[in-house]
Amino acid sequence: MKSTMIGWHKLLPVRHKLAASLLLCILLTACNQAIPKVTALEPTSDTACELDGMILKDYPGPKAQIHYAEGKPEFFCDLMELFMMVLAPEQKRPMAAVFVQDMGKTSWEHPAGNWIDAKSAVYVVGSKKLGSMGPTFGSFSRMQDAEAFAQKEGGKVLRFDQITQDMLNRGGNAAHDTTMSH
């Protein structure tokens, strides 16, 4: 009987090790499950802007969309509105992805498709080109396209993280400070 007790005590740590190994395998399997990749959606003919209700397809200039971690995407008819949302101090919702249109590959007057990651895009801020709400930013996947656009239309080329709330307050005009008059 004594040998049975000793054998049982020796097996106890093995059982714990086995249970711990099994639990570890389950956890690793859960961690290794692929997170679904978020892809941009093409707005339909009735897709409205999240902030002002304007129909996206009715207006020129690049559009944007934010895909939040917990829900459906929100669309914006203008990049100024996108940055107003992204840079708002009260913005706390986790974003799974942010997309803008590559204006080096689509028409300014009737943009369609050509969605790119907003955080890796380059922007022309302060150009004379107008969007749905007036002055806006141009978005590009290639630096060369952004520089060519800025040379033709004016403005300054910036990266996503260089855009500030102050630029939004001045109608996107980072290249030169002007005031609007009627």
Image (cartoon, rainbow, N blue to C red):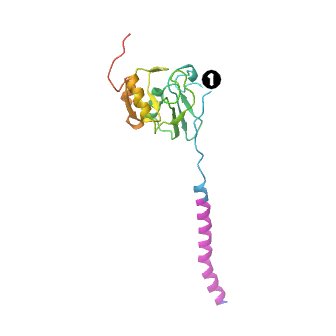
Q: Check if residue 9 falls in the magenta segment.
A: yes
* Nearer the observer, 146 or 61: 146
Name the residue at the top extreme: 182
Q: Check if residue 153 falls in the magenta segment.
A: no
**Image position of 155 (left or right of 50):** left
Q: The C terminus appears in which quarter of the rendering?
A: top left
- In magenta, the rendered stretch is 2-28
The residue tagged 1 is 46
Name the residue at the left extreme: 177
* Nearer the observer, 101 or 82: 101
**Percent x, y of residue 84:** 44, 29
**Percent x, y of residue 48:** 58, 24
**Percent x, y of residue 126:** 38, 24
**Image position of 128 (left or right of 77):** left
Where is 153 relative to 38, above or below? above
**Image position of 167 (left or right of 131):** left
Which residue is rendered at x = 54% and y = 34% of the image?
115
Q: Secondary structure at mark 1?
A: loop
**Percent x, y of residue 44:** 63, 26
Q: Amino acid at mark 1?
A: Asp
